Image (tube, rainbow, N blue to C red):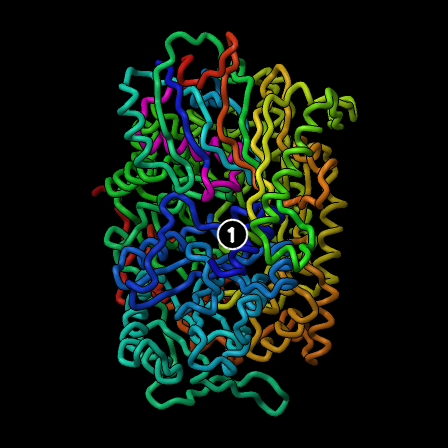
Amino acid sequence: MEQWKQVLEEEILPKVMKPLRYQGNEYNAVKKDWKAVKLRSLFAFPDVYEVGMSHLGLQILYGLVNEQADYLLERVFAPWTDLEEELRSRGIPLFSLESVKPIAAFDCLGFTLQYEMSYTNILNMLDLGGIPLLAKERGDDYPVIMAGGPCAYNPEPLVDFIDFFVLGEGEEVILEIYQIMAEHRALRQGKQDKKQLLKELAQVNGVYVPAFYEALYDEKGKFAGMKVKEPGVAPRVAKRVVKDLDQAYFPLRPIVPYLEVVHDRMMLEVLRGCTRGCRFCQAGVLYRPVRERSKDLLVQQAEQLSKNTGHNEISLTSLSTSDYTCVEPLLREVLNRFEGRNIGVSLPSLRVDSFSVNLAKEVQRVRKTGLTFAPEAGTQRLRDVINKNVTEEKMLEVAEAVFSEGWTQLKLYFMLGLPTETLVDLEGIAELAAKVLAKGREILREKGSKQAPKITVSVSSFVPKPHTAFQWEAQDSLALLQEKQKYLRSKIKEKRITYNYHDAELSFMEAVFAKGDRRLGQVLLAAWRLGCRFDGWSEYFCYEKWQEAFRQVGIVPEQIANVPLEFTTPLPWDHLDSGVKKEFLWQEREKAYQITTTGDCRFAACSVCGVCQDLDVAVSLKKGE
Amino acid sequence: MLLCLQYSKEEEARFLSHLDLMMAMERAFRRAGLPLAFSEGFNPHPRIAYASALAVGVTSEGEYLDLQLREELPPEVVLERVSKVLPRGLRVKAVVPVTKRKQSLMAVINLARYRVEVPIVQDYDQEIEKELLLQEVIDQEVIDRVIAQAIAFPVYLVQRQGKKGIREVNIRPGIRELTGQIRGRKLILEMAVQTGSSGNVKPEEVVKMVRARSPWQLGENLRIHRLGLYIYADTQVWLPLERS
Ligand code: SF4
């Protein structure tokens, strides 16, 4: 054993918190022979193990790649600060979990971009691996570095560090990419010619190589569009999308963590996409169209997952599980099959209606789960603006059903700072919560229950996201967001209502990195040098350091987050195509200001967003089959 | 039916806490498709009773648990099915039906054997380094003497954090055997100590006792390995499997 590994095993791991975070000995983890494969790749999750291991995308790609004889895919997560300290002080490189190899020893690394505030962790992980941060400083001997996930739809703040991005659903494209990389190496005695490799990769649909594009700026220094620099490279890159969820790869032998992770359960993916059309929601655009998986296949998968994992809970996951057209028969069948084995079911995302409460009640037969609903805004007017199809009447109906069925707690999610919001809308949040509470008191009293109802109001700040109808909107200034948070606090008077809100400074930074262009790479670098990491964790997020980073680089973050844009303003992500047309998004924005709603294309007419037309896919519902 | 399983927690699983290990075992039993018996109540748990908890970082080759099944199943079938689905680092070594024993494992087990590797952090004299072999012999004599002296004394007090604050406990009566061997720059202690509800001696405490009398500086990075858990009864030491 190399000496550093021995030091790691004997001195470091016994000392750090949760050493299991750094060992790949879990059930179903795959350890392959490095010499027997043509490509050695590493899935890098820029957050801690417990967060990363709860991510379905990791399990999908891990399973898919490792089932191929020619490739291997190992894992690495952001080391917690205690391990980072040990690694730095002893000069030990960041290593993969499975084979304990330095991350620089792999042929390629893939980061998943789930949220903007994980970006500094990417830089930190590369640095801990002894890999130069800047893509242009990495020669042919370093691994090629890719990234995918929702933030890849505006990856511009990361282009200095990442060699190429993958747009869309990874299982659809990863093997094409691997084949190109493996063949490229096979022709060169296991080495790579990075420039040439990137050229080859740029030919794959869904692959974006930022070095082949030049960002243009006008005389005022404003972003003015993107120009292709390299001959033969497409001016726009469109996402890849799975056509048929029944045919898509699904991991039936997922890794079963030893350590307790955020979601310790089997994940059944019942559908992908959501076309309810909330105008602030990025996932609702990126994962279009809605594709459901057949009930019978899901039941089969549940049986296999149960046999292969031993988990005692099945989660029916998706962006909106109560929308699954076969949800009732599926739920009934899964409950009946698994109840005798004491395997429970959970429903993570519930729509605001009594149908969903009934589903939750079914689930309660085995295990009690907390209930959360998201009306998002406090007044009907604003809910129509954002196209959130929830009425006060429905909300009270839900409250009635929830408290009648024996729950005494309810959590409500709202967003603050939405376009067109006024104080009336904030008061509406407090009023709606108070009405729900009153309904709860009434019902519980009628039932003769001694318990008092409890409501939690959880409020996040609106972040304008690329590829949404609100991508042109300004975020409220930090001061205004904080003012609104305080105002809402003053309006919530009931003791039985708990009010909590997200850090507005964090939401501000999120907006900046969601919408920013290439120049933000400098800020990331500066922030990382100032010690920023784990910014998504409130105990580590340090706004002062970020302010300092912006000052050092000379970029004013308010000009990115707090300025409204025109339809004609070139956007840093215009060359990246989710399939949904910009015209459609603008039209949705116009409708927002006219307080007009748009129907769900699953049940109403197609609103011609562009996905099905341009990407040759279709809505696929399983009802009646 | 009630089964007693003997299992090991090996290198690859050494950082599991007792809670992690319990979850890993439950999942393995579920994967094996065993007809688990569940507790009554709102949140039913499989009826698995552990003999003793192992701390994070500690390995063992002789752990035990009682497993209640809803249906009869030959022990060798359970052994085979579970062995196929255990994660790396956990291994079931034997399964026997519990017929005679009326008490829980935790109630009957009262002796544990450990092997503890203690690093010697003394700077070796270069001269002596050349004759490491000779050095070992000398050190062996020294360690034998140190242990003999420590054992000869009827009292060794350690401080323990209890519910009502710190209290002093004499661990010497709970140490049944203790030997030490020098291997390179490590001192290997093997010990048999009292464990369970009637009194518990921790291997770290025994190391402390030796350290107090050692002529060399003994390091803090201990590698603790449990060799087994036993039942001392009728003037004899039994394996739990023998008294099931
Ligand atoms: S193209 Fe039409 S049917 Fe397809 S996702 Fe868009 S709105 Fe729905």
Q: Which is nearer the eye, A258 or B199?
A: B199
Q: Which amino acid does label 1 sit on?
A: Tyr
Horizontally, residue A180 falls left or right of residue A142, namely left
| Residue B76 location (% of width, % of height) | 28, 23
The residue lying at 51 percent from left, 44 percent from top is A262
Residue at which label 1 appears: A22
The residue lying at 58 percent from left, 76 percent from top is A521
On whether residue B89 falls in the magenta region, the answer is no
| Residue B223 location (% of width, % of height) | 57, 41
- Callout count: 1
Give above or below for B243 relative to A561: above
The residue lying at 32 percent from left, 43 percent from top is A325
Q: Which is nearer the eye, A348 or A432?
A: A348
| Residue B136 location (% of width, % of height) | 59, 46
Q: Which chain is disc 1 placed on?
A: A
| Residue A45 location (% of width, % of height) | 49, 59
